[in-house]
Amino acid sequence: MNLKTRVTVLFCLAVSSVAFAQNNLRLWYEKPAKEWVEALPVGNGRIGAMIFGGVEDELIQLNEGTLWSGGPQKKNINPDAPKYLQPIRDALAKEDYKTATALCRKMQGYFSECFLPMGDLEIKQSFASGGSANNYYRDLNLSNATATTRFEIKGVQYTREVFSTAADSVLIIRITASKPEMISLDLKLKSRIESKIVSSGNDQLILSGTAPIRLDPSYYNKPGRNPLLQKDSLGHTGMRFQTILKAVPEAGNVSADNEGIHVKDANAVTLYLAAATSYNGMFKYPDTQGKDEKAIAQRQLKSALAKSYDDLKTRHISDYKKYFDRVSLTLTDTTNNRVNDILPSDFRLKLYSYGNYDPGLEQLFYQYGRYLLISSSRPGGTPANLQGIWNKEFRAPWSSNYTININTEMNYWPAEVTNLSEMHTPLLKWIQNLSVNGKETAKEFYKARGWVAHHNSDIWGMTNPVGNKGDGDPQWANWYMGANWLSQHLWEHYAFTGDKEFLRKEAYPVMKEAALFCFDWLVEKDGYLITSPSNSPENVFVTGKNEKYSMTEGSYMDIEIIRDLFTNVIEASETLNMDKDFRQQVIAKRNKLLPYRIGSRGQLQEWMRDYQEEDPHHRHTSHLFGLHPGRDISPLKTPELAQAANRTFELRGDGGTGWSKGWKINFAARLLDGDHAYKMIREILNYVDPTKGGTGGTYPNFFDAHPPFQIDGNFAATAGISEMLLQSHLGEIHLLPALPKAWPEGEITGLKARGNFEVNISWSNHKLAKATVKSVKGNPCTIRTDIPVEISGVTSKQSIDGKYFLNTFSTQPGVTYEIRPVKN
C-alpha cells in the first residue's frame, strides 16, 4: 500500500478510532517489535522492562537500576600522578602540546564500571485454536504508564498489560482472554550474567547471579587482557542479584521446573516479578557488606501478592499520575487534522520526518521525556544513566555509565522546570556521595583541596580520570570540570524550590568544596586566572603549524563552568548569610577569570587562542555553556556576547547526534530564536530506521538516536521545549520567550520557575492570551512579556526594556496571580 492510499484508508477509519484521538498520549503500533529500539519501556525507577509485544513468543528484557559490575572506588590508584602536573603546565605554557598530552596519560586511573542487563523474561504462548493473529495492537499509554498488547486469534481476543509499579516495587504482567481456558504459557528467565535457577516451586522461578567485579568498556579491548573479571586480587566478587517470577493463574493448572513455569488452560494469569541486588551504597563491597537481595526480593513479592491485580494497578496509576499530571501541554493543530492522531506512531514519525505538520506528535514527544524521567529516576534510587534504566547489552555502549561532561547533567535539565523536582533527588544524593570520593581523588592526583570529578563515573562514584593508567585519550579522559558542572544541579534545585535547609545542609558544603578545588587548580597567566591542563570536551584544535591536539590552557568551557560555580557559591553564601570571608575570596577570583574573547570569525572562542577546529561541525558545542545551561550570556543582558554565541552556533551548524541536537534546542531558545529552536525539534524528531542507522534523530519507539540509543536527547528536547515557553534563569519569569511560528495557539500548565512559582500560559495568534503565576514561597516576582499586561490584585512596578515589558510586584505565599494583556 503506497503512502497516499494508506493515509486515505486511515482517514476513513477515523470515525471508528475515536479512542486514539481522545487520548493522544500513546505510542502505538500495528506489529510486534523486532529490534530493541522498537520495544516499549516501562520502569519504576528501579525495575526497567522493554516489551516487544510478540504473539507466540513475547520477550520482556529486564533491568534493575543498581545492577552494575564493580565495587567501591579504590584508593592509592596512581600515587605518581601529582609529579606530572607541573611538567604538563610547563609544557603547555610553551605550547608543547605533544609532551603535555603524553604526560596527561600518566595521570589516569581505571575505567568506570558497566550498567548491566538483568535478564530476559521469555513468554511462549500457545493457542489451542491455532491460526494467525488479527487486529494486532500494542501501545504505551503515557497517561497511566501501562503497556498493552492485544490481538485476536479465531475470535478470541488476547490481552497483555504490563506496568512497573513504584508503589509496590514489582513488575506486573496480566494476560487475559475473552473466552475461558484459553491461556497456556511457558515462561523462562535467562541472564547473560553468571547466574542459575536456584529453585522453583509449583508456580515460581528464582534466578540468582553474580555480576563481574570488573568489566571493561566495549571500546577497550587490550590484547592479552580479559575484559571481564569475576573476582579481584583481594578476593572480592561483584554484586549479587535475585529475580523472582511468580505466576498466579485463574483456573487451569500451573507447574514449574528448572526449565520454567508452565501454565495450562487458564482463564487469566498474573505474573509478578520481583528483583533486588546486594548493592548497599557507594562505599560498601556488595559481596561482604551487601544487602540481602534474597530477603528484599521475597519481601517485595510477598507484599505485592497480598493485593489484588486491580488494587496494584490502581495504586500504580495513582502514584504515577501525581507526578505526570502536574504538567499538560496542548499545541493546537490549527488545521484540525484528525488523521495524525489515528496513525501508528512509527508511521506518524516517518510522515513527520517527511515534513508533515503534526503538533500533536511534538507534545507527545515532550511528555515522553517526562514519562521517561519518572520511570527511570525515583527518590531513593539511583540516577538515570546514559540509557536511563534500559540496557540490553552486557558491555553497553560507553558502559551505559554516567558521562558527566554533558550527558548526565542533560538527563536532569527537565526535572525542575517540568515540575518533577522529586525525580532530581537521586542525582543530588549521588553528587553528595560522589564528592566524598572526589576529595580523595583531588588529594591523590593533584594534592589539591576540595573535590574533583572527571569525564566518567558509575554507581560507585568513580572520580579519577579514566584510561587504565595511560590507555585513555586525554581529549576525553583528562577533563577536570565534572564536580563543578554537577554542583550546578545542587544550586538549581534550591533556585526552583527555595529550600534553604537543603541549601544549607546538603548543597552549599558540596559547592564550596568544588570551589576550593578550583582555587588550587586555577593558575595565573597574563593577569588572568585560567585552567591548565585543559580541553574542550572531545574536540580537537589545529595549531598554526597544522598540528592537531586537544590539551591546552584555558579552554573556555572550563572558565564558564567555574564562573557559574563561583556565582552560585556567592549567591548561596549571601542567601544563607554565612561564610562572608570565603565569599570575598570567591568574588576576587571570579573577577580575575579569563574574560570571553570573540574570535576572528565573530564567534565566541572555544580556546584561549583563536584556533581552528579539526571538525568545524563537532557535536559538542561546549563553549556555549555560558548561554545554556549557564546564565552568563543572554541577548537581554549581554547582547554582544549573545551575538557571538549565535555566530558560534551558526558556524558549528545544526547537525550532530541526537543529544547534540537536543542541546541546540536549548541554545536557540536562550537566544530567543523560536523558529531555530523549532527547526532543531523537527531534526531531533527525524525517523531513524533501526536496521539502517543514521546520525541523530528518533527511533521507532521514540528513544533518542545518538546513535546508538542515549536517553539524554529525549530529556534535552523536553527541557528545550520548556525553555521556548518559559525562562527564569535571569531572575525574571519570561513568558513565551521563544515561541515559533509553527505554534500559533496553545497552552501549557504546571511549569515551574525559579523562586518556586508555578506557571500556566495560554496563547493565541502567536501572542499571550492569559497566564497565571502561583507563588509558593511568596518571593518577589518580575514578569517579562512582549506585550503590555495587567496583573490581578496587585499594583506592579512597570517598566520597558527594549521591546519587552516588565512588571515587578510582591507576592503572598500560596496566592495565584492572573496575567492578561492590557485591553486597547
Image (spheres, rainbow, N blue to C red):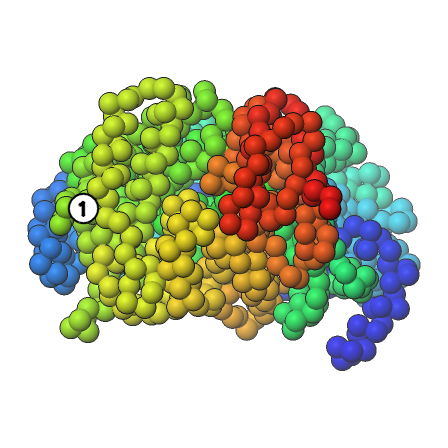
Quadrant occupied by the N terminus: bottom right
Q: Nearer the viewer, residue 624 or 707?
A: 624
Q: Residue at x 37, y 34 (%)?
A: 568
Q: Position of residue 322 (x, y in %)?
A: 68, 33
Can residue 634 be seen by looking at this rendering? yes
Q: Position of residue 537 (x, y in %)?
A: 32, 56
Identify the secondary structure beneath mark 1. Answer: strand
Q: Position of residue 653 (x, y in %)?
A: 44, 68
Say few, some or many: other residues with alpha carbon within 10 Å of mark 1 (under 14 / 14 to 19 / 20 or more).
Answer: some
Question: Which residue in the structure is indicated by mark 1?
Answer: 528
Vertical arrangement, residue 31 with respect to residue 61, above or below: below
Q: Position of residue 9 (x, y in %)?
A: 85, 72
> Which amino acid lies under the numbered mark 1 shown in the image of this protein?
Tyr
**Left or right of 592: which side holds 398?**
right
Considering every residue shown, the one lying at the far front of the view is 824
Identify the image quadrant of residue 11. bottom right
**Left or right of 494: which side holds 609?**
left
Vertical arrangement, residue 175 with respect to residue 9, above or below: above
Vertical arrangement, residue 221 with respect to residue 317, above or below: below
Q: Nearer the viewer, residue 522 or 434?
A: 522
Q: Nearer the viewer, residue 787 or 751?
A: 787
**Left or right of 685: which side holds 606?**
left
